[in-house]
Image: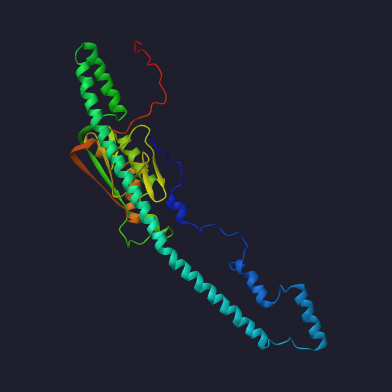
Amino acid sequence: MIARQDEPDRREQAGRPGDRARPPGRRPDASMSLLADLFAGKHLDPGYAEAAARRAASGRAAPRPGRLRGAGVLLVLALTGALAAVAGVEVHRSEPVAAERHSELVGQIRARTAETDALQRRLGRLRADTERRRAAALARSAEGRRVRRDVAAAGAAAAATPVAGEGLVVTLDDAPRGVPAAPGHAADGGRVYDQDLQVLVNGLWAAGARAIGVNGQRLTPTTAIRAAGEAIMVDYRPLGGPYEVTALGDAGRLRAAFAGSPADRRLAALRDRFGIRYGTHRSGEVRLPAAGAVRLRYAVPREGGGG
């Protein structure tokens, strides 16, 4: 999978809302000049200015607010307080309904996820049974054995068969609560974003990984890693942290090739700057399941394949 990395970093977008340059020659308090002029009486309405001029010419003082105006102010304050009280009561009444609706939606999501997991396990069992029957049928002839080897190679490239062996395991997780944000950046900079997983996965492919999985979810050549709200979607399935990325291959070579790579430097910088938890370790035995069904989009004849 080659994921997109041309989008700007969300931490940079969210962390610098006020870094715009001020035009040259502009006063620092230019945005407050209107209020200052109003208090100084420089922007009076023409009608008010004309009335004030007439009073000054006749020698009369401005009328003082009487009891009627004071009573009107009290009435407005009382009505405002009553409206605020009614609004508060309505909000308090709607809170249980919103909480109940939220709990219902969470329950539905969990139920659908459990159904999907059960169907995925059933699909795995059916695939294994189909593979056994196909292998037995193809083993009856030399041509069948050749076809079986070709199918196995294609299945491995398409992540259609489970794999096992040694590999490298990389763990990413949000920063612990209470870790202060870096100066000039948003408070949620300690979160793991979909872009971080994209960079990590592409770095492991570049290091020579033969197969990769995220939290047990096998990646295919067409797998997308995207964000939906605060959730990270891998092949349209929501995953939560900590994110364990497993790369199958020679563990020593993978670690040597990945160490110091652009992906490793980026994640190490996020760990040092925002407190994101990031670590790697070698594993002598990792297992990755087959990916979900791959939809065939294009088919072309192989050159020199003999038909």
Residue 203: give x, y in percent of width and height.
33, 39
Q: Residue at x 56, y 75 (%)?
A: 80
Residue positioned 38% across, 29% down in the render = 295
Q: Quadrant of the C terminus?
A: top left
All told, the count of numbered labels is 0
The residue lying at 78 percent from left, 88 percent from top is 60
Residue 143 in picture, x, y percent from top left: 24, 11
Image quadrant holding the N terminus, namely: top left
> Where 232 falls versus 102 (above or below)?
above
Relative to 83, is 248 above or below? above
Q: Quadrant of residue 94?
A: bottom left
* Residue 200 x %, y %: 33, 42
The image quarter containing residue 68 is bottom right
Q: How is the image coloured?
A: rainbow
Q: 70 or 141, which lies in front?
A: 70
Q: Is residue 101 above or below residue 197?
A: below
Residue 297 rendering spot, x and y as whole percentages: 41, 26
- Judge by depth and name the residue closer to the eye, 2 or 293: 293
Q: Is residue 60 left or right of residue 30?
A: right
Along the viewing direction, whichever of 161 and 209 lies nearer the viewer: 161
- Residue 191 seen in the current view: no
**45 lies left or right of 94:** right
Q: Is residue 30 visible?
A: yes
Give me the residue at 60% from left, 81% from top: 75
Above or below 72: residue 206: above
Identify the residue at the far left of this view: 284
